[in-house]
Image (cartoon, rainbow, N blue to C red):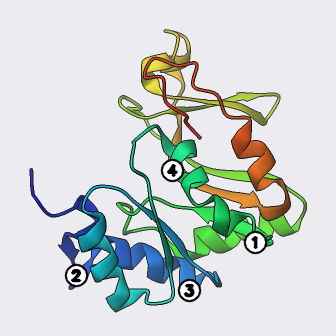
Amino acid sequence: KSAVPKVLHTIAGLPMVAHVVRAAEAAGSGDLALVIGHGADEMRKATQKFAPKAETFVQDKRLGTAHAVLTARDAISKGYDDILVMFGDTPLIDPEVLTAARLKLAEGAAVVVVGFRTSNPSGYGRLIEKDGKLIAIREEKDCTDEEKKITFCNGGLMAVAGKHALKLLEQVGNNNAKGEYYL
C-alpha cells in the first residue's frame, strides 16, 4: 500500500507508466490520451515530464476498463486510424507486440486482443474462442467452472480500429459479477 499512485512507482529509473508510454511511442503511436484516476493531480504533474503533449482524462468513478476508455471519448472521436488500449502498470510491454497489433488492424481487423497461455490461469480473465475466433473475454469471477479451465488469458492490451471504436465501446454492458463495464 502506498499513497503514490501505483503507475508512478519507479522501475529502472522511470515511473512505471513512462515505460508504457515509451513502448507506445516506439511502436509508432502519435497522440497520447492518458486516463487517470487515483492521484489525478500528481499524475498530471508527473506525466508532464515524460509525455508533455498527452491529453489527460480523469475517470472519477472506477466503473471498469471500458468505462475508463470511454472517459477519453473526446480523444477517440478525433478519428484516429487505430487506438491502443494499454494499462499503466504493464511496464514490460514489448513495442513489437504493439506494432504487430497495429498491423492486424491495418489488415482489416476491428479489434486485436493480446493474450497469453499459462499453465496456471488463476486470477486472469479468459479469452474464449470458438472455431479459432475470439467470442468473449470473461473475468475469472464471471467464468463457469468449464471456462476456468481455459489457459488462454487476457493480457490486457487491445488495439481498436478508430472508425469502430466508439460504436464498439458504447455496446459494452455491465452484466457481470462486479457490475462494471469490462473490455
Marks 3 and 1: in contact by CB < 8 Å?
no
Quadrant hosting residue 169:
top right
Q: What element carries label 3?
A: helix
- Which residue bears the numbered disc 2? 12
Question: The residue under label 2 is which amino acid type?
Answer: Ala
- Which residue bears the numbered disc 3? 26
Q: Is mark 4 on a helix, strand or loop?
A: helix
For label 3, the crowd category at 10 Å Cα-Cα, with few meaning under 14, some 14 to 19 and many 20 or more, is: some
- Which residue bears the numbered disc 4? 68
**Residue at left offset 67%, top offset 74%:** 99
Q: How far apart are marks 1 and 4 (CA)?
A: 17 Å
Position in image of residue 8 (x %, y %)? 24, 70
Looking at the rendered image, the disc whose residue lies closer to the viewer, 2 or 4, is 4
Marks 2 and 3: in contact by CB < 8 Å?
no
Q: Of 103 and 55, which appears nearest the observer?
A: 55
Q: Is residue 36 above or below residue 119?
A: below
Mark found first going from the N terminus, 1 or 4: 4
Q: How far apart are marks 3 and 2 (CA)?
A: 18 Å
Quadrant hosting residue 76:
bottom right
Question: The residue under label 1 is which amino acid type?
Answer: Lys
Question: The residue under label 4 is which amino acid type?
Answer: Ala
**Disc number placed over residue 78 in the picture, else none:** 1
Position in image of residue 49 (x %, y %)? 33, 90
